[in-house]
Amino acid sequence: MKHKNHIKILFILSLLLGITNNNVVWCQKIDVDSLLNVAIKEVNKDKNYESALKKTQLGIKLAPDYLDFHLLAGRIYQLTSVKDSARYYYNHVIAKNPVYEDAFTYLINMDIEEKNYTDAEIVVDKAITAHPGKKDFRYKKLSIYELQGDKKKSQAYLKEMQTLYPKDSEFKLHYFIEDTKNDSDRIGINYNFTTFDRSGYGPWHFGSLQYIAQRNWGSAIGRINYSNRYANGQSMVDGIQYEAESYFFTSKNSYSYAGVGYSSDPVFPKLRLGYSFFHNFKKGWEGDLGIRYIDTDDTNFPSAVIGVGKYLGSYWLNLRSYFMFDNSTVYPVFTLTSRYYFNTRFDYLSLIAGYGTSPDERTTLGQIEQRLSLDSFRIGGGYNHIFGEHYITGLQISVNNQEYTPGSKQIETEIALMFQYQF
């Protein structure tokens, strides 16, 4: 009996001792958590880095395996420009437990700030291995290539990401922008045929011959346009217009458009000027602001341009508004364009809807003065495709419900064909 009583007493003492030790550990956990929260507050809100660092070092002594203290110590050293110490603590966290995404992010950003792109690439590769589904690290890797100005690596990596994430709008936007920086030349022709349901009116013929030089800085375009308008089976007016345009990069995330057109023939306006500034934001957004100026024999029409675009996976949506001024009257024009891209920026289906006569519509530009105050509702669709590496083709059909005098309307059907050779 005495033996059994001794066993019971030992069991109870062991149980009490275990509970006491657990309570000590639990209380200590509460203490270090509180210590960590106070230190984080001092870093983020109070900016009291010296006091926060002391608390962080105490936390490391109390709980050496509590990696949040090591991470915070690295952050404090980074913010106070003690980069070697910051790097030591980040690497310690990564080595002990690579689940800490912030350790990778802080270390990568620090290497990028110091332009240590080789080290940054090594760390980002480790981050991608540890977190293969985290696209933020893949974006970081692309940024490293772009900051280095390494076109070959950027393009190869973007192709890889296009395969891995075909619906990702951020990668698709970068892929298309990078593709426009490849040196290439294109020569092409365009032909537009427009018929009208009004008896004795039309058809219209519009053709263009153009040359496009694409370089790392942007592109330059030279174009000659010819228009011939028929009525009652006879040519009523025709003429030639000369155009020069350019798209050029102004920064990593922005580019501009500038264009000028001239003609001495009445089928075209005498002078056409245009400028737009485009900026690419995050998440596949793009915005643009611009101006247009049309000078005819009788008057001139300045206009303001505002547009917004968005990549949604393989889709691109763009809404552009024109506000045309004639004396004290403002005439609005709206154009909604949507595209579904396939493998390249030359392969897509398009759908266009709009109201009003835009100063960017070449086939009707010669009638801008007559059409400005008249209603116009149009819709159209098209398909562009590149065959091999050289031949680019396009077909677009649109229907326009056009008011030609107040209260009288006509249906205009336009077929546009495009062919380019890239070399």
Image (cartoon, rainbow, N blue to C red):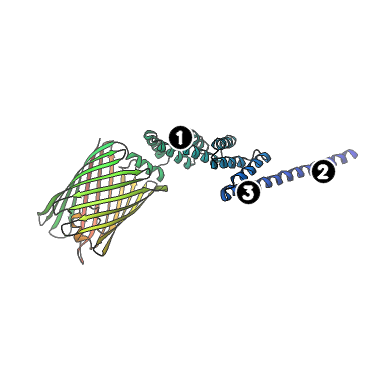
On the picture, is 294 further left or further right than 21? left
* Percent of width and height locating residue 375: 24, 62
Tell me, for residue 240, which label it has, or none. Answer: none
* Percent of width and height locating residue 98: 56, 37
On the picture, is 125 further left or further right than 178? right
**Placement of the C terminus among the 4 image quadrants:** top left
* Residue at mark 1 to residue at mark 3: CA–CA distance: 35 Å
On the picture, is 72 further left or further right than 367? right
* Percent of width and height locating residue 177: 35, 42
* Percent of width and height locating residue 94: 56, 36
Mark 1 highlights which residue? 117
* Residue at mark 1 to residue at mark 2: CA–CA distance: 62 Å
Label 3 sits on a secondary structure element that is helix
Task: Verify CB contact (< 8 Å) between mark 1 and mark 3.
Answer: no
Around disc 3, counting alpha carbons within 10 Å, would you say few (fewer than 14), some (14 to 19), or many (20 or more)? some
Residue at image coords 23%, 60%: 401
On the picture, is 44 further left or further right than 250? right
Between marks 2 and 3 in the image, the one whose residue lies nearer the viewer? 3
Around disc 1, counting alpha carbons within 10 Å, would you say few (fewer than 14), some (14 to 19), or many (20 or more)? some
Mark 3 highlights which residue? 38
Residue 23 visible in this rendered orientation of the protein: yes
Counting residues from the start of the chain, the first of labels 1 and 3 encountered is 3
Q: Work out whether residue 312 or residue 101 is closer to the camera in this orientation and state it.
A: 101
The amino acid type found where label 1 is placed reads: Tyr
